[in-house]
Amino acid sequence: MLPRVAFGVAVLVSLVVLFVPASGVPTAPPGTDKVVHLLLFAALAVTGRWAGFARLPLGAGLVAYAVLSEVVQGTTPLNRSASVADGLADVAGVLLGLLVWAAATRRTR
């Protein structure tokens, strides 16, 4: 049960981080948002694998979520902008999370 709760919390955090209006986004040094995107999607991938989701469907779903989040940011009244660089950071985070999970579970076998 804990793994699914962890994944659910990661999803909820991602919804807040990705879809808060621009007025709610804190100021930070340049590039910080890319690190946040990378770590957020890595956390989604790791907790998703821990929750038992298969690697390929999870990875594909998270990449689709990354694309969708950028489209929503760029086309809705959130006053946020779509960013290819953010999307690439998201995809890199998915790959990083899947690699971390694979390495961690390989060691424990």
Image (cartoon, rainbow, N blue to C red):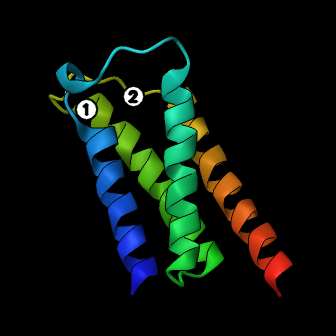
Mark 1 and mark 2 in contact (Cβ < 8 Å)?
A: yes
- Amino acid under label 2? Ala
Question: In this figure, which residue is indicated by the disc labeled 2?
Answer: 82
Could one spot residue 84 in this view of the protein? no
- Amino acid under label 1? Thr
| Quarter location, residue 76 | top left
The structure residue drawn at horizontal position 46% and vertical position 48%, both measured from the top left corner, is: 66
The structure residue drawn at horizontal position 76% and vertical position 78%, both measured from the top left corner, is: 105
Q: Is residue 97 above or below residue 7?
A: above
In the depicted view, which residue is nearer to us: 59 or 46?
Answer: 46
| Quarter location, residue 12 | bottom left
Question: In this figure, which residue is indicated by the disc labeled 1?
Answer: 75
The N terminus appears in which quarter of the rendering? bottom left
In the depicted view, which residue is nearer to us: 9 or 94?
Answer: 9
x then y, percent, for residue 9? 34, 63
The structure residue drawn at horizontal position 64% and vertical position 74%, both measured from the top left corner, is: 56
Q: Is residue 93 above or below residue 76?
A: below
